[in-house]
Image (spheres, rainbow, N blue to C red):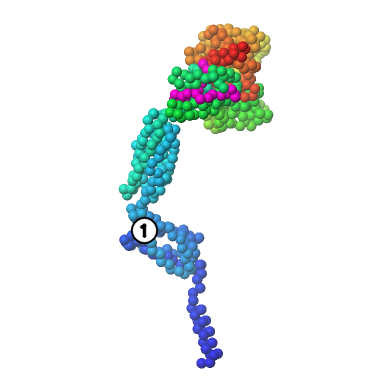
Amino acid sequence: MNYYSAFKLALIILLLTLTSCVISSYNDPCSLSGKVTDSAGKGISNVIIIAESALIKDTIKTSSDGSYIINFLNGGAVDLVFSKTGYTGISSNLVLLGGEKKVLDIKLNALSEDAYFNVGLKEKTILNTGETFSAGISTNVSYEYESMGAWITCTKTGSELYIKCDSNETSEERITTVILRAEYNLKDTIKIKQLAGPVLRILDYLGKNNTSFPQTRPFVTFSREISVLSATGSNENLSVELSEDKRTVYFSNIKLNAFSSMPIQLKVVASDGIQLTCNLDVKLYVNSQFIPPNNGQKFFFTNDNRYVWVYTINGFSSSLRQFSCIDFKEQTPIILTESSNQFYNSYNNSLYVVTYRYFEDRYVSDVSIYNAETSAFTSRFTIDSNGNTISAMAFSDSGYGLMILGDKLFYIDSSDSHKWGIFSSSTILYDPHQYGWLLPRYIEMCNSNKTFVLYGEDTSGTISVYTVSAETKVLARIFNSTGYHLVTTSNSGAIALYYYDILNSIICQNVLTKTSKTLTLPSTGTRNTALLLAEDSTPYILTSDFSVITVNDNTIQKFTHQGECYYIKSSNDGKLVLVNNNGTVYLFQSEMFTKFNNYIKSLVSTKKN
């Protein structure tokens, strides 16, 4: 064979070889098959196989001998998961070629063969102040725990275990064990030791949210006996005294203003050498919030005294701001988009926001109701009374209410779908000098929301006050006089106040018995008042010039504040009082005035001297 013939033969053989090769394409169908067996080589039936590629996601189960086959429309990357209860699952990733018939055998171990339970923390020593820590558990099985100490709380999140230890208020070291029991007889323990207590910490001080006022001086009370190492305030050393049980520190030379706090630093040491440095703001009020004064400002305490609502106007916008009565921190406000009037209903613990709308040829009152706890809008209704709109509204605890519409007094029953109608056309309600002008212009509640108090002035300046029983619906005039004005009522009692600036006098009247007592006002007069109630039911009157009048003996206690407060309001139970002073609203406990005022009185004397 010559060279040319040999070359030709080689070329023919090469072409035949190339044409006999299969050129793989991912678009061609392919398959995956195999068998799933246990560690002994026995096929496992009903193993769940999840196969996911770019185009499909398929789930199948193995046959009785553990075999399986999965067909794919095309090749490509495939993710596989093999699982069955009681076995350790396996994941696999592979690439199938077009036209390929790939075999993949899988071995699954029983959980009992692969089970592990590792506890990273075997022992833990914690301080007497308590703490929460993680046990560092790594496992693939479920487990249970048992705490041997009542001061231990365990919480399982996923496979992790969190252990919370309370503070140790005893004088002994304590030890406990957490027992862990897992599947397949796996178990472990965690030993916890806590240092002896009790914890040295502050229990109370003047200005703390839950402070009561049995003390006669500013104080700080600790959980253990202590000695004072140092005490400073306003860059001055403070004079201190210890109580008989050596747990309370009294400050003898602190002079507090009602509307300002004094930062103090107190360093103490316990008998076991533990030291504690405290930085406190000693103050007479619970907390304060900046709320600019204005003519439209109102305060509404909820009937359970959990919240107080403050209506404020800022330019053309207004809002109802909600504050907690515990710490006077702001909660969820209600933003008002138009001019309105606001009232509170103790029956359903709701705020009623009244807006006025021109409808056809007359004005109507739209009443929007908001939940006074959650701030959520609940419903709306409309009062249409021939163009007369709501100017005043109040409700009793039974849901029965009164409202003033134009020149008439109406009832409204919130317990009966807000059914309303004319209450009375009695002539005693109308100004004899000007027909059609309703004498009562305002409605207040007293006597634990059982009695309505209505009042207003006629053209001569004479004030008349009426009561309406929420139960009997009886209307009665209880007070009539020229010069007295601005009625304040006490919801914690059955008391109404009428005062006369020119005469510097105030009349305190029981609205049920109609008995009254005339008291002397501070020489500076007053703008408004709030009624406070002491534990012995003795009424106290807090005036806007920050004086306290004791009704029983007409003694007047003048506080350190000079000037007049814009607005004051006591809670329904008389235990709290809000005071707006120069645009900042302060929440006080009434006890500060009824129990603590002897200390403030002594401060006034000290300042004068």
The quarter in which the C terminus is drawn is top right
In this picture, residue 308 sits left or right of residue 483: left
Which contiguous range is marked in magenta?
Answer: 216-236
Is residue 221 highlighted in magenta?
Answer: yes
Closest to the observer, 276 or 385: 276
Residue 189: percent from left, percent from top: 35, 42
Residue 604: percent from left, percent from top: 59, 14
Indicate the amino acid at tag 1: Leu
Please say whether residue 408 is visible from this viewpoint: no
Residue 59, by quadrant, is bottom left
Q: Secondary structure at mark 1?
A: loop
Residue at horizontal 34 percent and vertical 59 percent from the top: 38
Residue at horizontal 44 percent and vertical 33 percent from the top: 129
Residue 13 vertical placement versus 468 (above, below): below
Residue under pointer 1: 108
Residue 301: percent from left, percent from top: 54, 23
Local packing at callout 1 (Cα closer than 10 Å; few below 14, some 14-19, many 20+) is: many
Residue 531 vertical placement versus 108 (above, below): above
Residue 266: percent from left, percent from top: 53, 25
Residue 37 vertical placement versus 574 (above, below): below
